[in-house]
Amino acid sequence: MKFSIQEQIAAYEARRATASARMVEIMEASAEAGATLDIAQQEEFDGLQDDLQAIDGHITRLKSIEAQAVRTASPIIVTDTSSASTVRGGVPVGPARSVTVQRNLPKGTAFTRYAIALMRSQGNLMQAVEVARHWHDSTPEVEHVLRAAVAAGTTTDPAWAAPLVDYQNMTGEFIELLRPETIMGQIQGFRRVPFNIKMPAQVSGSSANWVGEGAPKPVSALSFNTVTLGFSKAAGIVVMTDELVRFSNPSAEAIVQRDMIATIAQFLDIQFIDPAVAAVANVHPASITNGAPNIPASGVTADDLRQDIGTLFAMFVQANMSIRGAYWIMDPIMALSIGMLSNALGQAEFPGINMNGGIFFGLPVVVSSNVPHHTSTGESDPATTMIVLCLPSEILLADDGGVALDASREASLQLDSAPVAGATQLVSLWQNNMIALRAERFINWQRRRAQAVAYISGARYGGNFIIPKPPVTDGEEGTNGEPVAARDTANVTTSRS
């Protein structure tokens, strides 16, 4: 095995220390005996002294080679982040280059493990720290956050805020994973504002007119009101068995993570886009489409679609608003149906759009399966949906960007998605070996202008999307309750639901 110069120097210095210690030991033994060294001791001592001289000389030569290697080595390129330039030998030579090392873990793993540690420890932070030690090698920030929660911070401690950095990073990692799944996460350009604010808004402007000689000038009054954006909180509770949490593994973590993401994403999407969601004072905001101008779809053909899109654009023009930076929001099947529209030559009428989104009339398309399937009159029709045109720069959005987590196993809960105050039928988590995780997020939105959003209701362009029924196997019952044989379902169709 070939050793480096530094390793050789260290090895010879260790040999030198051993020989020197042996020489001291020989002389101390002679002093204790009150006699001079015998022949064997003299030979050993003299041999060790010769070895020391040889070792010292060899170390000197090795250090000389090391110094020569340093002088002839290529300079190391250092990135100076303060000047944003690459420095070689103290002289800037070009733009800075940075190297980022990322963990080979799914995004959100640290946040999920933080939640699992809280649940497994039943809310006891000291026990949660012990649980987090199992993940110290892969996600050490989980342990750091829990330890930071145990010790109280003081204003005299210069490192008081340092542990909080890990918690912010973990929460941001989870939100980064959540937001691309939501409608809001796919739209850029919202007007970001803080919570609990009031802003003056102009309702009507002044007027001017031609004035003849000697005639009085017109006087007009402006009209103002106030736009208020308060606090709104979305919360949910997930209950799991103690066995699931106790024997957690990567697959159990994935279950927790997928469930939290899917639940929060679906809820926020529906509340954000469904026109049936009206504002409730001090509880939640109205959707951006609630009370927004809308038109019913005029038909199912490509020409009908062009006519309706033109009418939608005209709404923005008449409101003196530019559609630059606007987004389309629609169901992915609706986007697919539009992309499949073709002319008499078989050419796509709108080639830029598909079920993953794309570009439609020059504007980006955001698709979500949470776009509701009903008309503006409230009639339920699974075959129809809505197409929304949204101008995000005219929508106020307050979002603290974090999720607060609490865990308990001693509480008694109503295991109901629509709990009522004062209910008596409660389930004891402790008695049933269950643990509850509560997640809360503060978020609020509001249209800055009433015309910031418009939509087409009852859209079914391209006709019904055909979905085949599942095949019927031998032994299954038919519509009359009698067993039927397996049959070909190639010609069996149903409307989209």
Image (cartoon, rainbow, N blue to C red):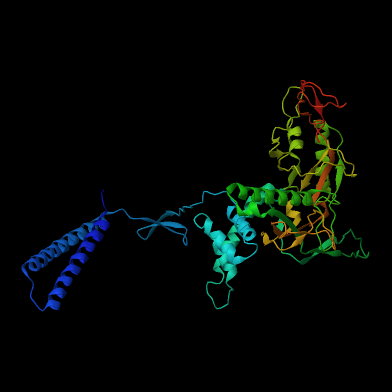
Query: Viewed as shown, does residue 208 lie left or right of 399?
Result: right
**Which of the two residues, 39 or 277, is positioned nearer the viewer here?**
39
Residue 495 falls in image quadrant: top right
Q: Nearer the viewer, residue 358 or 2?
A: 2
In the image, farthest residue toward the right: 215
Q: Quadrant of residue 65?
A: bottom left
* On screen, residue 294 above or below 146: above
Q: Residue 142: in sight, yes or no?
A: no
Q: Position of residue 46 (x, y in %)?
A: 9, 66
Residue at the location (55% across, 62% down)?
A: 130
- In the image, taking residue 233 as reference, residue 405 lies left or right, namely left
Tell me: residue 344, above or below residue 278.
Answer: above
Q: Residue most toward the left?
A: 39
Task: Tell me: residue 365, above or below residue 73.
Answer: above
The foreground one among 57 and 342 is 57
Can residue 27 be seen here?
yes
Q: Position of residue 406 (x, y in %)?
A: 68, 62
